[in-house]
């Protein structure tokens, strides 16, 4: 069964807070991982790919734990503009299945 | 500018009236896909295409058709729309299957 599960949310945090999202995936053969951001009623946009060694892009840090089959996204110093839904995406590396999207976690940053 | 375009962006139609939603990408991508997004259900894949003249069903293909006669275009066809096809539809493309996908702006369809 192909499955990607995310923290249900919503996460309501004040500006400046650090917030972390987790995502678990069921297929150990998964090869690549991504975080997408989706604003209300807009298209999903790639936030960052997730590499085995972990990677950082400004205030955002993504990590992969293959042994436990989860990925995480850490957002430091939250901004109002970070308010969005964050989608965890996994490539199951099976022909015809392409990317599997989680249902998303909603983040609301308030002043 | 590299992009995926969809038309129309908004459409209200009646049950049974055939419609087509166009999708075009200018990035020379091999892979294209259609999704629908409904509250609480997330993104669900309708159809995908690995290349020209190569299409296949996704998770929710019933009631939809697609074609891929040219690399850049991947239209979604609803031969006889029904109210349960009211949804937000996204087209996406990627260099190949499994790579990060780039999405069009979405088409909000209402079937009455």
Image (cartoon, coloured by chain):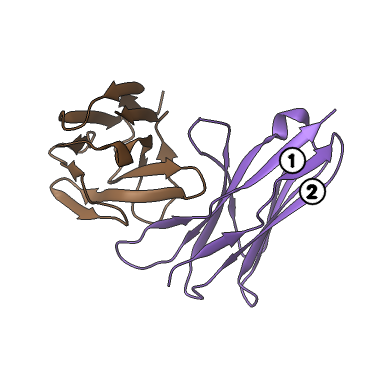
Chain colours: A purple, B brown
Q: Mark 2 Cα within 10 Å, few/some/many (few <14, many 20+)?
A: some
**Residue A10: image x %, image y %?**
70, 46
Residue A52, picture quadrant? bottom right
Res. B4 visible in picture: no
Q: Nearer the viewer, residue A88 or B8?
A: B8
User: What is the chain letter for disc 2?
Assistant: A
Q: Which sits earlier in the primary sequence, circle 2 or circle 1?
A: 2
User: What is the chain letter for disc 1?
Assistant: A
Q: How many marks?
A: 2
What residue is shown at x 60% (from left), y 72% (from top)?
A: A69
- Secondary structure of the residue carrying tag 2 is strand
Q: Which residue is mark 2?
A: A19
Q: Along the horizontal axis of the image, is A17 left or right of B69?
A: right
What residue is shown at x 16% (from left), y 45% (from top)?
A: B52
Residue B21 to residue A32: above or below? above
Residue A111 to residue A35: above or below? above
């Amino acid at each position: 069964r192909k499955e990607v599960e995310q923290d249900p949310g919503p996460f309501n945090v004040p500006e400046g807070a650090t917030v972390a999202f987790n995502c678990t995936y069921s297929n150990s053969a998964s090869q690549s991982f991504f975080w997408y951001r989706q604003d209300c009623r807009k298209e999903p946009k790639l936030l960052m790919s997730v590499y085995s060694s972990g990677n950082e892009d400004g205030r955002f840090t993504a990590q992969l734990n293959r042994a436990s089959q989860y990925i995480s996204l850490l957002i430091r110093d939250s901004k109002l503009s970070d308010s969005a839904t964050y989608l965890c995406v996994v490539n199951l590396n099976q022909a015809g299945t392409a990317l599997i999207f989680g249902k998303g976690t909603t983040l609301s940053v308030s002043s | 500018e590299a992009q995926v375009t969809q038309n129309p962006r908004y459409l209200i139609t009646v049950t049974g009236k055939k419609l087509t939603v166009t999708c075009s990408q200018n990035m020379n991508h091999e892979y294209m896909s259609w999704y629908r997004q409904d509250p609480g259900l997330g993104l669900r894949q309708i159809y995908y295409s690995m290349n020209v003249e190569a299409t296949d069903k996704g998770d929710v293909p019933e009631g939809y058709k697609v074609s891929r006669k040219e690399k850049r275009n991947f239209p979604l066809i609803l031969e006889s729309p029904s109210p349960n096809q009211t949804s937000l539809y996204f087209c996406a493309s990627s260099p190949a299957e499994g790579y990060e996908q780039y999405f069009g702006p979405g088409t909000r369809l209402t079937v009455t």
